[in-house]
Amino acid sequence: MIRPYAIFAAFFAIMLALLPTASRSSSPDLPCTLDRATGTTVDHKPFLSGAYGTRWNLATDRLAFMQPIASGYYRIYTMRPDGSDRVPLTDGRPGLPGGHHGMVYWHPSGRYLLFTAQKPDWKGARMFGSPDFGALPGFGVHDDMWLIAADGSRSWQLTNEPNAKQQGVLLPVFSPDGKRIAWGSRQPDKKYLLKLADFVELPQPHLENIVSLRPGDGTYFEPGSFTSDGKSLIYTTDQGTHNFWSSQIYRLDLASGTSTRLTAGKDYNEHPVVVGTPSGDWVVYMSTKGVNRRPFRLMLGTDWYAMRPDGSGAKRLTTMNLNRKDNPEDQGAAQVATTVAISPSGTFMLGDVQDSLVKQTGLIRVVSFTCK
């Protein structure tokens, strides 16, 4: 007598044999990309020291980042991923203001780069070794949005913010097709708006159809990146929490104007970056979730997490702030993970780590995905 489970086992074996070979054996050979990753390996030796804000243009296979020059002012550089052909893109270029330049973002074609530049008629105090400290890139005040050709030959000022104490531009980003730009705009009341505009190249690069948005009840809005289809913007905000240090990640549907919260809890989340993978978009972001505050240290570090664009599948990527002796990613001090740039292979990313929030300095590490 043939038992029922034996019939089932025989049927399953026959069906498995009929499946194409690739369906059964290709999985172990697939590259370890973000969607499959179960963890990471963080290279302890910095890829670049004294630099951060890195962006990787896949069309030209070039990196862009910001780094201070001898005077302490930040400048933008580009180079090949192997470190060769390093170009000081904004240093000494005629027509550019002489203060800080930073927070660079590539046009997808690789022809242009967006960045913020300190207003030429604003001067501030030197603090913690940085001149005009209040205008440091990333603070979002005393600056304008600029565009520069990839070879540095021409540049264009895209916004002209009032030279007021509280106003400026925060983290401008291109859409995947290069036709739109989003940025955070700080207002006189210290509150922010999300702004969107069409990027028009002719007769010379400029913005058109600027729209101001304030989703929900938020007062802080920081763009992260557009989804791959360009239909949504992933951003950071305090809407719903009313506390910057409990900021959350949201998705804004650009057609309807509907915003959806993607992260949960009261942890501090910021810097979402959309990453295309073989199975679709994922979002890498930084969070204080699950980190250990070190004894007698005020600074709380952040680690990288990832989730799908609807907020599902959230997983921790790094354990840089898990204070444990058997943790190879532990450097013995708090580490603040910020933005990332995915490699063309999708198997690793370059991650910006701030080593001083007070001095606003940082370094870039290689973070490789691992799959079990």
Image: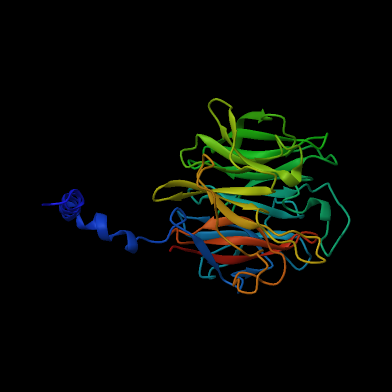
Q: Quadrant of residue 198?
A: top right
With 356 as the anchor, is 223 left or right in this view?
left
Q: Is residue 191 above or below residue 24?
A: above
Q: Is residue 292 above or below residue 143?
A: below
Q: Position of residue 104 (x, y in %)?
A: 63, 52
The quarter in which the C terminus is drawn is bottom left
Q: Quadrant of residue 145?
A: top right
Q: Residue at x 51, y 60 (%)?
A: 62
Q: Residue at x 63, y 60 (%)?
A: 352
Q: Residue at x 66, y 48 (%)?
A: 269
Q: Position of residue 315 (x, y in %)?
A: 54, 53
Q: Residue at x 60, y 69 (%)?
A: 329
With 179 as the anchor, is 13 left or right in this view?
left
Number of marks in the image?
Answer: 0
Camera-nearest residue between 222 and 299: 299
Q: Quadrant of residue 67?
A: bottom right
Tell which residue pokes out farthest to the front in this image: 1
